[in-house]
Image: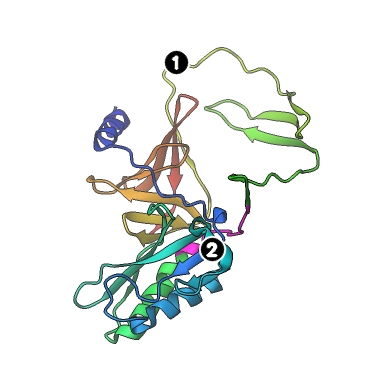
């Protein structure tokens, strides 16, 4: 009953699509020589630092006054970096947004924070922290052909796998699948036994751990992102007006909430409600 009320309340607040930038579609990152809101070019070396950090993360970063010929002819090949400065009086808080050629925000980093008093080292430290967001992104530019991504012909793939599934109070079952996927042939064959049509009455949703390892919460502009020890971004959480309740795009739409000192992920899969326990460190 509580979970139903929770879903109703969340949907009243409205589900929001989290930003999931397709960075591989873009060849360049355009770095302005003077960010909006700054009085002079490269003030506090912000442009130099941002360009350096993008290059360090594997991107091709260029200044806005030195565009390569293909980018000058087609600005949609690049994303323009924008510095989102929300610094209060006694600290520096910045994040970096990436804007496409249609002035739409494609991606935004977490907010980096520094309490150094001097501006230049403060911006450097805050930006370095913000760029941790790119550690979980495997960037590789994929060229487009006739407005579409180039398709790469792959060799036929035959996949066989076993997946042990433990359902509510039922013995483990073994699922065996054979699959072939090529441009000429698409086949799928399931060798698993057919499940029983009988459904247990008054089934209870059990909490299953999402992962045995700890997930570390990193602040973002509108919530948190959970990363593992790799570090790799596992989930992105968006704040709601309810304390300790977050929206996430796991399995479409889902909710992360705290109950009895523990964190849980609640979502729907094939019409069935699922509840998984999370090990989050803030």
Q: Secondary structure at mark 2?
A: helix
Residue sitting farthest toward the left = 89
Q: Main secondary structure of the magenta part?
A: loop
Quadrant position of residue 122: bottom left
Q: Is residue 106 above or below residue 62?
A: above
Name the element at disc 1.
loop
Mark 1 vs mark 2: in front? 2
Q: Which mark is residue 152?
A: none
Reply above or below: 126 against 280: below
Residue 8 % position (x, y): 27, 30
Task: Give yes or no for residue 140 being in the magenta stretch.
Answer: yes
Whether the magenta-drawn stretch holds residue 206 is answered as: no
Residue pointed to by mark 2: 71
Nearer-the-camera pick, 76 or 279: 76
Q: Quadrant of the C terminus?
A: bottom left
What range of the chain is rendered magenta? 133-143
Q: Which residue shows up at 44% across the image and 48% down it?
A: 278
234 or 84, nearer to the observer: 84
How far across and down, in percent of the image, does residue 219 sit?
A: 35, 61
Colour scheme: rainbow
Question: Residue 146: image x %, image y %?
Answer: 62, 45
What residue is at 23 percent from the left and 45 percent from the top?
242
Question: Quick one: label 1 or label 2, which is nearer the N terminus?
Answer: 2
Question: Which sits in the foreground, 261 or 150?
Answer: 150
Pick the residue in front: 265 or 56: 56
Q: Which residue is denoted by mark 1 in the rendering? A: 201
């Amino acid at each position: 009953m509580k979970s139903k009320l929770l879903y109703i309340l969340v949907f009243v607040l409205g589900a929001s699509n989290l930003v999931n930038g397709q960075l591989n579609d873009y060849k360049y990152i355009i770095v302005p020589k003077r960010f909006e809101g700054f009085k002079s070019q490269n003030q506090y070396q912000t442009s130099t630092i941002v360009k350096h950090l993008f290059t360090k993360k594997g991107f091709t970063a260029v200044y806005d006054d030195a565009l390569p010929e293909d980018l000058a002819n087609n600005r949609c090949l690049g994303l323009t970096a924008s510095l989102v400065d929300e610094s209060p009086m006694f600290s520096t808080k910045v994040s970096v947004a990436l804007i496409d050629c249609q002035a739409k925000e494609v991606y935004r980093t977490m907010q980096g924070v520094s309490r150094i008093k001097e501006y230049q080292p403060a911006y450097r430290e805050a930006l370095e922290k913000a760029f941790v967001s790119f550690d979980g992104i495997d960037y590789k530019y994929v060229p487009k052909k006739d407005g579409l991504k180039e398709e790469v012909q792959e060799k036929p793939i035959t996949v066989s796998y076993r997946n042990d599934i433990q359902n509510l109070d039922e013995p483990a079952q073994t699922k065996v699948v054979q699959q072939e996927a090529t441009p000429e042939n698409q086949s799928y064959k399931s060798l698993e036994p057919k499940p029983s049509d009988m459904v247990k009455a008054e089934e209870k949703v059990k909490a299953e751990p999402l992962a045995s390892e700890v997930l570390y919460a990193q602040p973002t502009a509108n919530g948190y992102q959970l990363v593992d020890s790799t570090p790799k971004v596992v989930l992105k959480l968006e704040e709601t007006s309810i304390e300790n309740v977050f929206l996430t795009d796991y399995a479409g739409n889902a909710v992360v909430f705290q109950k009895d000192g523990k964190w849980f992920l609640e979502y729907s899969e094939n019409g069935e409600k699922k509840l998984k326990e999370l090990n989050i460190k803030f």
